[in-house]
Amino acid sequence: MPPATTSTLDSFVSSSKTPRQVLATSQEIRDRKSTFVASAYKASTPADARAVLKHHKHVVHGAKPASHEIAAWRCMVLKEGKTGLEGVDDFEVQSGWEDDGERYGGNKILKVMQTEGVIDVIVIVSRWYGGIMLGPARFEHIETCAREVCRSFKRKQDMEECIAVLTAFDEELGRLRDELAQLSSTSPGAEAEELPAKDESPAAKREQTKKAHDYTSLLESLDVVKARRLISARESSIKSVKGITAKKRNLA
């Protein structure tokens, strides 16, 4: 019969609906044999945050347990009795923290999160104690790791929002171009100078759609400035195609 601890861990791992994915990790800070590192995960509710903390402690660091798993979370949730249909006033931010033996540590992380403005996230700072007491310096390390991971999380969040906008614009642009192509087909040659010839075969369309929606490398780069430039370019393209379409309709 396996040990009880193994059975409990196996049960915990198998009961997870989906693997928890760390979205950001800070650089390690090492000071007098102690090591600090922060991790950020998405968490939509305080209960979700506690489940993530349990997973991080028992699964991610199961083979090498940290001395302290100090955490804080901020989640935007519906107020009791509200439906969300009346706007932002139906929601509230619920926050909390866990010191895990490092008194005041969780509150230090929470204050960093409030300053950085991150929401729907749990930040966990793991500390492996090296046997030498650090005094107030330990709080500086906790805050530094938390700040770094919050900013990385925020960049990823901003990038995901940009890609969502780009994807929506790609779909709209595709629809507008199809509409323009149909209008052009009713009067052959009318738009020859305005629209470059392109391969309209099914295979070519599938490849164009795939390329238009493949933002994997952009997501990994976290280049939000580039993403915003692409959004501006898509907006200009949409405006241009709408203008050509309107002109075509007026000539019809």
Image (tube, rainbow, N blue to C red):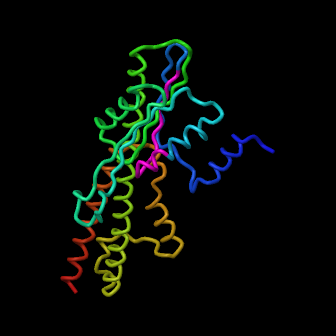
Which is more toward the observer, 20 or 222? 20
Asked if residue 244 is positioned above or below residue 57 in the image, the reply reads below
Using the rendered image of the protein, determine whether residue 226 is visible from the camera's viewpoint.
no
Q: Is residue 101 left or right of residue 110?
A: right
- The image quadrant where one finds the C terminus is bottom left
The total of numbered circles placed on residues is 0
Report the residue at 49% width, 63% height from top: 210
Q: Residue furthest right?
A: 1
Using the rendered image of the protein, determine whether residue 171 is visible from the camera's viewpoint.
yes
Report the residue at 58% width, 53% height from top: 16
- The answer to which image quadrant residue 60 occupies is top right
Q: Is 44 part of what is drawn in magenta?
A: yes
Report the residue at 32% width, 58% height from top: 78
- The answer to which image quadrant residue 63 occupies is top right
- The image quadrant where one finds the N terminus is top right
Q: Is 157 part of what is drawn in magenta?
A: no
- The answer to which image quadrant residue 197 occupies is bottom left
Which is more toward the observer, 53 or 150? 53
- Residue 154 rendering spot, x and y as whole percentages: 36, 42
Q: Is residue 82 left or right of residue 26?
A: left
Region rendered in magenta: 35-50
Asked if residue 245 is positioned above or below residue 39 in the image, the reply reads below
Which is more toward the observer, 25 or 252? 25
Report the residue at 32% width, 73% height from top: 176
Q: Is residue 208 left or right of residue 224?
A: right
- Residue 92 rendering spot, x and y as whole percentages: 28, 51
- Residue 31 rendering spot, x and y as whole percentages: 49, 15
- Residue 132 rendering spot, x and y as whole percentages: 52, 12
Which is more toward the observer, 66 or 226? 66
